[in-house]
Image (cartoon, rainbow, N blue to C red):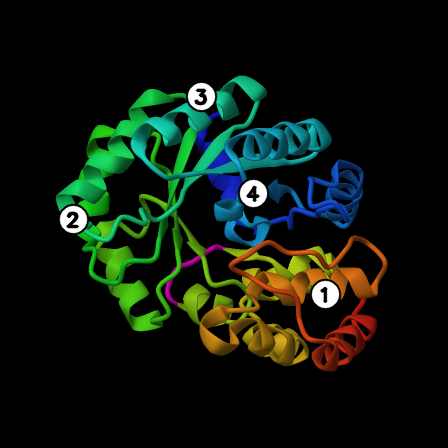
Amino acid sequence: MTFETLKTALADVVAIPVTPFTEEGTLDTEAHRVLLRRLLDGGVRTLTPNGNTGEFYALTPEERRRVTELTVAEAGDRAVVLVGVGHDVPTAIEAARHARDTGAQMLMVHQPVHPYVSEAGWVDYHRAIAEAVPGLGIVPYLRNPLLSGARLAELADTCPNVIGVKYAVADAARFAAFARDAGLDRFVWVAGLAEPYAPSYFASGATGFTSGLVNVSPSLSLEMLHALRAGDYAAAMKVWEQIRRFEELRAANGSADNVTVVKEALASLGLCRRDIRPPSRELPASARAEVAAIAAGWPV
């Protein structure tokens, strides 16, 4: 695929699949396949294995490789695969090369979790990964509100495979300024805080958004995308109203239950177990009924 083709794939609903586990705590590969097929059959065309909704930081290196392989195999020619990589530079490069060799087309580079991140060091980190796999599209996952747009432009000057940005700073005005400082038309801007922020970010130049909710109801996410593409913000906000409470539950307490709520909804539909790994935790029984009621009322 050309970088232009990959840019088109980013200007879409970028699904972040969950990673289901068995009762023994291992990867539930059969449930995973079922969930991926459900996304594909629902019209999703861009998949991000090893994203945060997939519990990236709770998976072992071998599990992350397995998730990548399984996703690429299921996607086939039906979807583009954007693999999440991160941790230290050698680990990220190893995962990047594995993704390339497996057949993935793009990488999402997780925000560095090091406690001391300089702007120049951020550029160096992403440059090392991008240069290791020049044929893959690179999408930085940007959660740092202190980074300047000029630094992203600097990175892309030396790494032309940096083609998009998953922007996940909860500030629409900051996003609008950052995108214009970096080059609004130079990158595909993906609203990285999913459906709740998609309308405001689209108004400022985003053309795609990530989603964990899409695991539960692909049709709702795609309905919002189609409305935003048409510039019909009233229709998009009707979807926003439908998903509001679900997303509030995910965002509560610093997003403590971000993945937990999605898995609980899937469990209520009989699609996978609710099991989740520390430092996340399952919802208490008292909260499960509300999530189940929301999921039951949505189109699937």
Of labels 2 and 1, earlier in sequence is 2
Marks 2 and 1 sit apart, C-alpha to C-alpha, by 38 Å
Q: Is residue 82 above or below residue 13?
A: above
Name the residue rendered at 51%, 45% in the picture.
Answer: 56
Looking at the image, residue 129 sits to the left or right of residue 60; the answer is left
- Which segment is the magenta one? 204-208
Secondary structure beneath dot 1 equals: helix
**Of tags 2 and 1, which is closer to the observer?**
1
Amino acid on which the number 4 mark rests in the picture: Thr
Any part of residue 78 in sight: yes
Q: CA distance from mark 3 to mark 2?
A: 25 Å
Q: CA distance from mark 1 to mark 4?
A: 20 Å
* Disc on res. 78: none
Q: Can residue 235 be seen in this snapshot?
A: no
Magenta span: chief secondary structure: loop
The residue tagged 4 is: 48
Assign a secondary structure to mark 3: helix
Q: Amino acid at mark 3?
A: Arg
Which circle's residue, 3 or 1, is located before the other in the chain?
Answer: 3
* Furthest residue toward top: 101
